[in-house]
Image (cartoon, helix red, strand yellow):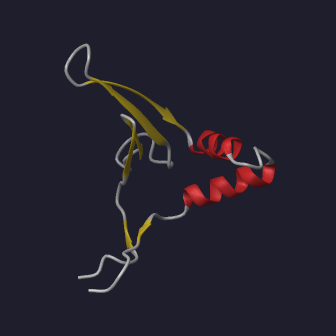
Amino acid sequence: MSTANKPVTNPVHNLGGFLFDRCPSSTAHKDGSVRIRFRVCSQEPNTEYGMIVDPDSWASLIAGLSVRGETSETWELARQLHNRPSVCFTIGTE
């Protein structure tokens, strides 16, 4: 069965120990807020720190780090992209 164009329910991106994902829709932050977590293994086992970033601040972060910098146009583009449904695509044929 192909997974092309099927929604990704809650993708997690792992980058150097930082985990980024959308807050689950069952939480108070179901508005598209992004959860950033970091696990520290050197102190207590599986100690995890994190923060919640609201959708508008996330768009500001993405736009501000873009080549063009944050303008009203780049912020709006980042906000629109963030609010689009996630879609998983496969490469190749079955």
Whether 48 is drawn above or below 34: the answer is: above
Which corner quadrant holds the C terminus?
bottom left
Q: Position of residue 28 (x, y in %)?
A: 42, 39
Which corner quadrant holds the N terminus?
bottom left
Whether 17 is drawn above or below 79: the answer is: above
Q: Position of residue 93 (x, y in %)?
A: 32, 86
Residue at the image position 37 percent from the left and 78 percent from the top: 4
Residue at the image position 36 percent from the left and 47 percent from the top: 24
Q: Quadrant of residue 64?
A: top right
Q: Does residue 69 appear to the left or right of 41 in the view shown?
A: right
**Nearest to the observer: residue 1 or residue 53:** 1
Residue at the image position 31 percent from the left and 76 percent from the top: 3
Q: Does residue 36 appear to the left or right of 55 in the view shown?
A: left
**How many numbered marks, from 0 up?**
0
Q: Position of residue 51 (x, y in %)?
A: 45, 29
Q: Quadrant of residue 37?
A: top left
Point out the residue furthest to the bottom here: 94
**Nearest to the observer: residue 58 or residue 30:** 58
Point out the residue furthest to the left here: 45
Point out the residue furthest to the top here: 43
Q: Position of residue 33 (x, y in %)?
A: 50, 43
